[in-house]
Every structure is written in structure tokens, then in C-alpha cells.
Amino acid sequence: MRFPNFIYHYTWLVLIPVLCACGSGVQEETKALRPVLSQQVDYAESLNERTYTGIAQSDKVINLSFRSSGIITLFDMRLGQQVKRGELLAQLDNVAARLSYEQSLASLSSAESQMKTSKLSYDRIRSLYEKGSASLSDFENAKNAYQNAENSFESAQRSVAIQQDQINYGYIYAPEDGVISNINAEVGENASPGQQVAVLNAGDKITIELGMPENIINSVEIGLDVDLRFSALPDQVFNGKVTEVSPALDRNTSTYPIKVTLMETDENVKAGMAATAMFRFSDLEKQSLLVPAKAVGEDSEGRFVFLVVDNGQSAKVEKRRVKIGRLYSNGFEVLEGLQRGQRIAVAGLQTLLDGQEVSLSN
């Protein structure tokens, strides 16, 4: 049976939309790739720059204390007070020292009286001995008695001087011109010998004490220029020089103490300010690779990074073992495992897998 032509045409018109609809349903699924922030590995040109922190202080700090014990009856010191050399700053009641001094005076008076009596007796017996009216034994006894009395008198004199010093130890006089920077006592407190009651900044320069690691200390020498910055003055850079280098390790910090002195005078720089010191060492290696600390991971086999391999059409990450050196403020020094120009992932290492395809978001 033959169908009219219009029936064929109608059939095709019905089938074409159906076939098109079926064809559109056959689509490949698009894989969602994890975006990765990456960075190119390059030389660190500033590895010869090292930064350390410390606290500014006067170059001459004197701890003030009494050399005897007692109750503080005078304490003429305030924070920031300007003092002059020889000025009386504090005083103890000195009751025990004054009592001992009075006893020593009494002993001195007794010893002096005994010495005078012995001297008169010695002179009398010597005169008799010279006339033949006294024996040699009497003369020797009188001479020895006088010498003993004289020695006792001299001893009593020294005791009086010592007890006078004990009274003086109950006073604190300003040893230098300066500024009171710390106070640790008040009137009415019981002070003991050597107990710090105040601190006097007597120097006219500011120093910063720093601790240097053993791998750097041999590059530090007296006179080395240092850039100083203070947290209270963030927009200013000051010139400093290394003025002291310790040859011995501080066991408490495992570093070598050094001192950097501020070479210019600025009234805005005060003791106690936090300071940052930047050193430039010309003898340190400059051509070293540096990677951010967050780009370096560690597992049971050691340190690693994720190397980004990009062939132009797709990118993936590969786990690469590396050997790292020192840690600096801006990252790790890489000794082995990477080359300049390679690209590594710098974030999200915990979620990356070796060989994983990624998209670059940098």
C-alpha cells in the first residue's frame, strides 16, 4: 500500500524533534576540579637580611638597693623623676646600726681610757727601770700591757668606722645623673641588703640587647651597621651599630647576647619600647631557593611540597620530597628537590592528593 507523500513529510516532521530531544540528553559530565593557589619557586635575594627583636633600654642601668636591713622611712623617688648625682633618694630607720654604733663608741672610750692608763704606767716603770729601781720583768710587763691597750684602742677605732658605714648603708644617694625608670618599694616596707628598690637609667644612649643564633654569631662584629625600628615609631628607621658581642652562649636562651646602640639621639625613643633590628650580612649565601612555610608539609617520610604540573590543557599536582634548610621570616630555604621556575601549591596541602587534577586560581 502506498501512502500519500504528505504522510511521509508529516512523519519526518514528528520524528525530527524527538530525535533531537534524544540526542541532547547524551552529554558528558563535567568534572569539578579543585582550585589551587600556586607560586613560582625563585631565589631569595634577601636571605642575607636577618631581623631580630629586643627591648630598648638605657646603656647604663643601675639597680638601687640598701646595703643593710631596716624599715624604709624616706623614699623620695617617682617614675620618670630626674635625679642628680649625690641626691638623697631613700633612707632606713637604722635602729640596729645606730645601736651598734653607740656600743662601738662606748668600747672606744673604754679602750682609750685603758690605753692612757697603760701609757702612764709604762712611762713610770720605764723611768724607774732606767734608774735601776725596777726589774726588767716589770718593764717588759708594762710595755706589753701598753701595746695591748694600744692595739685594743685601734681596733675600737676601726669598729666605730665600720659601724658608721653600717649607718651610711641605710641611705641611698644617686650614684649618677639619670631618670628613675622602675620602683619596687614604698615607705614603711622592710628592706633587706641587696634588695632592689628602684632602677636608675643613667646613660645618655639607648641600647637594644639581642640574642643571636650560633650559625650567625660569627658574622656579627663590633661596628656592624644595623637598621632599627620601634613599634611606637613605625614610620621611622634609625641607625644603630653593634657595640658588644658576647663570646659565650647564654644557656637560658641558647643564643649569644649582643648589644646594638642607637647612634642618634631622639627624645621619642624611650627605654622599654619594643625594637626590631635588621642586619645585613654580606658573607651569607644569596642564591638560595625559598618557599613559603605553608607550602611545606610533613608526613612519616619527611618534608614534601606539591609540585604543580601544567601542560597547557590541564594541570595536576605531584608530591615532591624536599630537603629544607633554615627557617626565615618569609619561608623555608630549600636545599634539594626543587628548581628555580617550578610552580608549587601554597595552600590547602591537607586536601591535595598525589596526581590529583586541579585548576589554577592564581
Image (spheres, helix red, strand yellow):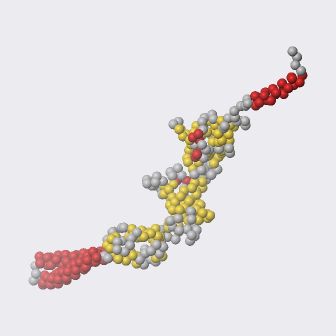
As displayed, is residue 98 above or below residue 15? below
As displayed, is residue 312 above or below residue 291? above
Q: Which residue is drawn at 51% across and 58% down?
A: 210
Q: Residue at x 87, y 25 (%)?
A: 9
Q: Residue at x 72, y 36 (%)?
A: 313
Image-based side of 211 in relation to 278, left or right: left
Foreground residue, 2 or 360? 2
Image-based side of 76 in relation to 3, left or right: left
Foreground residue, 214 or 136? 214
> x, y percentage for residue 11?
83, 24
> x, y percentage for residue 292?
60, 47
Image quarter (top left, top right, bottom left or bottom right) of the C terminus:
top right
Among the 4 quarters of the image, the one containing residue 141: bottom left
Q: Is residue 182 visible?
A: yes
> x, y percentage for residue 287?
63, 46
Image quarter (top left, top right, bottom left or bottom right) of the N terminus:
top right
